[in-house]
Amino acid sequence: MDISFKNVSYTYQLNTPFEHKAIEDMSFNIPSGSFVAIVGHTGSGKSTLIQHLNGLLQPTAGEVAIGSYRLTAEKKLKDLKELRSKVGIVFQYPEHQLFEETVAKDIAFGPLNFGVEQQEIEKRTAEALKAVQLPEGMLERSPFELSGGQMRRVAIAGVLAVQPEVLILDEPTAGLDPRGQKDMMEMFKRLHKQEGLTTILVTHSMEDALVYADHVMIMDHGRKYMEGSPQEVFVKKEELKRVDLDVPEIIQFIFKVREMFPTDLNYHGQTIPELAEELGRITRGDIHE
């Protein structure tokens, strides 16, 4: 589903002494099938922005378009429930939202709420569990008997069972160890490609944004500060520094190499082994430009 914001602003507690403008005059487009990372510090407006994508919030100015659905300040969307079946949100620590007595019932809750028939629910439940790489024998277990990582995967399976076209990931690796973070992001990458999802990742991790996204948007104080491909955005060291963001480590390393050797080595999505091979050629003198 294509997504666009046109001059969107949102103000909390509007027309009160406590009003606070969380996002201001935001305009951007996300083509269907994209993997977009939204990066910014706490308070930059990231969470407010993504809550517009399934109608949890309605803009106080401007228009949000998600496929054929339109959200404006003037008119409440009639098909809000239908929109929410198309847009799945994985919030931070989604395992805290588990509540059913079995894994199967927890995964089935979303489709059941959207009126899916029982036979289809059972099919989707099995498929969602497989998608998050958990064994089918886990379905009748209590989710509260599982490890933290397994609980998170069950919660994500519950979102996937609704079969959304847009998947929003709000700091999905928070609290996981480095191996767990990598496994989780690789899972989302695989799901994005297999299901043809439009995926929006909200993250503090510049490395995750660099590796997994095909487009990056930087937010600062409720406004869009900069956007482009990861290769375009993350080489702008001074611009990122102005909003207290660091260049990803692999790009910092490439900058150091360029200071030490007469080369125009650039980041173009290389893996670490591929970068090591390039550096080997440089140090052997195979590349002088």
Image (cartoon, grey):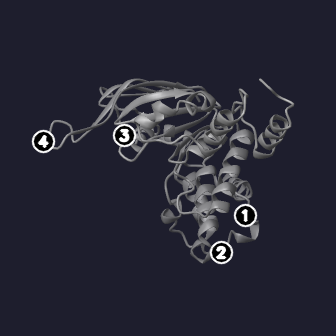
Q: CA distance from mark 1 to mark 3?
A: 33 Å
Q: Which residue is mark 1?
A: 134
- Where is residue 191? Give x, y as percent: 70, 45
| Three-letter amino acid code of the residue under disc 3 | Leu
Q: CA distance from mark 2 to mark 1?
A: 12 Å
Answer few, some or many: residues within 10 Å of disc 4's Cα (few below 14, many 20 plus, some between 14 and 19).
Answer: few
Task: Tell whether label 1 touches label 4 (CB within 8 Å).
Answer: no
Question: Disc 3 or 4, which lies upstream in sequence?
Answer: 4
- Where is residue 155? Give x, y as percent: 58, 60
Residue 134, quarter of the rendered image: bottom right
Question: Disc 2 or 3, which lies upstream in sequence?
Answer: 3
- Where is residue 277? Give x, y as percent: 83, 41
Tell me which residue sits at (83%, 40%) in the image.
280
Task: Tell whether label 2 touches label 4 (CB within 8 Å).
Answer: no
| Three-letter amino acid code of the residue under disc 1 | Leu
Q: CA distance from mark 3 to mark 4?
A: 20 Å
Q: Which mark is residue 57?
A: 3
Q: Which residue is mark 4?
A: 17
Answer few, some or many: residues within 10 Å of disc 2's Cα (few below 14, many 20 plus, some between 14 and 19).
Answer: few
Question: Disc 4 or 2, which lies upstream in sequence?
Answer: 4
Tell me which residue sits at (55%, 58%) in the image.
109
